Image: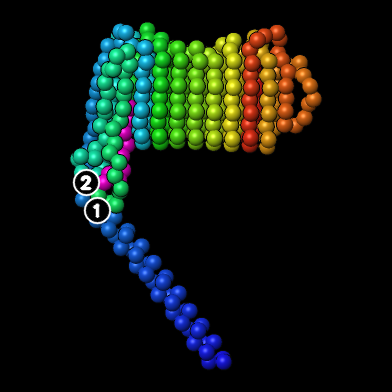
């Protein structure tokens, strides 16, 4: 009996040793293979530009993947899209390209990437950016859809602003809109000196909103992340703040309504029709004067 048990143990040990050896050998060959492939990869420079007249345009639409976006206000009279950077890869046919066109009253700006299974022969790395220059006099709609890339927006004034981001930080400075609708899956949102209505939904990431002027409605829903809201001292509004797991703090003198508890705060500041609604599942909420 003991001899059989010992044989079984030896077989199990040998099987484990063989399995681990194969795993280590496979990892070695995979690393060596990738090194060889990487040596053969070429670095490709990208520098493409498209220019459009802004007259009779009522929507600019930007759609990108794995590209950082900068939206910049300019005193020029044309919209300019500049796509640039470097990528490393084996096939020139897989280089991402700027595809931009005017359709009716819309300007569509797209970064075209071919969908491939990367086994070492496609593009393995890249650092690309898209700068979009928008004339100051353009005050219509701006829509952005992006997957995996940071977004920076500075000094624009538009009617409706729509942003759908799957992964990446969002930064806005001196943005003025009639209404902004932002939907983000993962990444921080920072808006400085913002003006306009705001509807923001976030699954993961901190949210920091600083208003330059406030006479608006604002709604924020977040699953995971802290929320900080800074308002001018002359702001008047009604508010309702809820958090499932987190604290609610404010240094603003408020008139409270209803019952007060750790995860709900409701009331008003002055007499106004403006509504602020914040719902945070996991994260602290702060509302203060700036």
Residue 20 visible (yes or no): yes
272 above or below 81? above
List x then y, in percent, for residue 156: 42, 14
In the picture, measured across the screen, residue 70 lies left or right of residue 265, that is left
Mark 1 crowd level (few <14, some 14–19, many ≥20, 10 Å Cα): some
In the picture, measured across the screen, residue 157 lies left or right of residue 116, that is right
In the picture, measured across the screen, residue 70 lies left or right of residue 177, that is left
Q: Which residues are magenta?
A: 122-130
Q: Which residue is mark 2?
A: 90
Q: Main secondary structure of the magenta part?
A: strand
Q: Residue at x 80, y 25 (%)?
A: 259
Mark found first going from the N terminus, 1 or 2: 1
Whole-Å distance between the Cαs marked 1 and 2?
A: 9 Å
Mark 2 crowd level (few <14, some 14–19, many ≥20, 10 Å Cα): many
Q: Quadrant of the N terminus?
A: bottom right
- Does the magenta run of residues contain 260? no
List x then y, in percent, for residue 149: 40, 33
Q: Which residue is mark 1?
A: 37
- Residue at the extreme right of the image, as rendered: 259
Out of 70 and 56, give the one closest to the viewer.
Answer: 56
171 above or below 59? below
Q: Are marks 1 and 2 in contact (CB under 8 Å)?
A: yes
Please tell me in which quadrant of the rendered image residue 237 appears. Answer: top right
List x then y, in percent, for residue 263: 72, 31
What label sits on residue 272 in the rendered view? Answer: none
Q: Residue at x 68, y 35 (%)?
A: 244
Q: Residue at x 68, y 22 (%)?
A: 240
User: Total of numbered circles in the picture?
Assistant: 2
Q: Residue at x 41, y 10 (%)?
A: 139
């Amino acid at each position: 009996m003991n001899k059989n048990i010992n044989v079984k143990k030896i077989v199990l040990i040998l099987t484990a040793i063989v399995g681990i050896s194969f795993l280590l050998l496979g990892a070695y060959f995979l690393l060596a293979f990738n090194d060889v492939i990487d040596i053969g990869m070429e670095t490709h420079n990208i520098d493409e530009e498209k220019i459009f007249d802004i007259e009779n345009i009522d929507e600019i639409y930007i759609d990108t993947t794995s590209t950082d976006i900068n939206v910049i206000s300019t005193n020029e009279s044309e919209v300019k899209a500049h796509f640039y950077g470097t990528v490393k890869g084996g096939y020139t046919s897989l280089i991402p390209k700027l595809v931009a066109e005017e359709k009716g009253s819309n300007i569509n700006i797209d970064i075209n990437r071919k969908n491939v299974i990367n086994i070492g022969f496609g593009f393995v790395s890249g650092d690309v950016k898209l700068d979009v220059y928008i004339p100051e006099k353009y005050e219509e709609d701006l829509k952005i859809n992006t997957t995996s890339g940071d977004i920076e927006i500075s000094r624009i004034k538009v009617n409706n602003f729509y942003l759908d981001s799957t992964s990446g930080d969002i930064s806005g400075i001196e943005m003025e809109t009639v209404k902004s609708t932002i939907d983000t899956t993962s990444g921080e949102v920072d808006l400085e000196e913002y003006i306009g209505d705001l509807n923001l939904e976030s699954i993961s990431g901190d949210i920091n909103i600083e208003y330059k002027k406030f006479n608006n409605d604002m709604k924020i829903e977040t699953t995971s992340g802290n929320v900080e809201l800074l308002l001018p001292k002359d702001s008047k509004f009604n508010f309702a703040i809820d958090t499932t797991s987190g604290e609610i703090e404010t240094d603003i003198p408020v008139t409270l309504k209803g019952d007060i508890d750790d995860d709900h705060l409701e009331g008003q500041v002055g007499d106004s029709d403006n509504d602020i609604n914040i719902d945070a599942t996991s994260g602290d909420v702060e509302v203060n004067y700036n």
